[in-house]
Image (cartoon, rainbow, N blue to C red):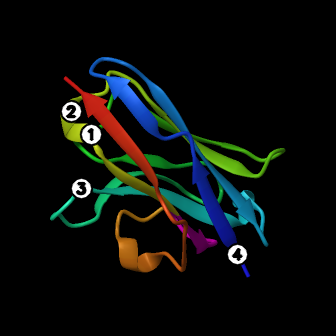
Amino acid sequence: QVHLVESGGGLVQAGGSLRLSCEASGGTVNRFGMGWFRQAPGKERDFVAAIAWSGGKQSYGNSVKGRFTISRDIANNTVDLQMDSLEPEDKAVYYCAADILGPGSETPSFYEYWGQGTQVTVSE
């Protein structure tokens, strides 16, 4: 059974940075397409970033392009999300997800495994 645990969330001022990490157990990240999604109160879960199982393709949601970077650390079996130039609109619960041998889809339903989420709050 694959288990995902997110960490690194917190409170930051607008313009600041945070680095989220998703640690996987029960499988290795280089066998999964991995995605980051976020959900604000009263809103749908939105795509943030994804990386294909091969590591050869990364994709980003329009609102985070140029500010967020997804990467994976095979040695530590984690997938990280570096978030720079944070804006109040980035406030949400951030979830990581895994899709076995997946292409790094932007669609939540493609992912079989999900973490519990980590809260990110950005103050004005």
**Mark 3: amino acid:** Ala
Which residue position is annotated with label 1? 90
Residue 7: image location, x then y, percent: 58, 46
Q: Is residue 30 left or right of residue 66?
A: right
**Mark 4: amino acid:** Val
Q: Nearer the viewer, residue 60 or 79?
A: 79
Q: Is residue 124 left or right of residue 3?
A: left
Separation of marks 4 and 1 at Cα, in angstroms: 28 Å
As helix, strand or loop, the secondary structure at mark 4 comes to: loop
Residue 27: image location, x then y, percent: 77, 69
Q: In this view, does 124 lie to the left or right of 47?
A: left
Going 48% across and 58% down the picture, which residue do you hit? 35
Q: Which of 57 and 84 is in front in this view?
A: 84
Q: Which of marks 2 and 3 is nearer the N terminus?
A: 3
Which residue position is annotated with label 4? 2
Label 3 with label 1: CB-CB less than 8 Å: no
As helix, strand or loop, the secondary structure at mark 2 comes to: helix
Which residue position is annotated with label 2? 88
Q: In which image quadrant can residue 4 be found?
A: bottom right
Which residue position is annotated with label 3? 40
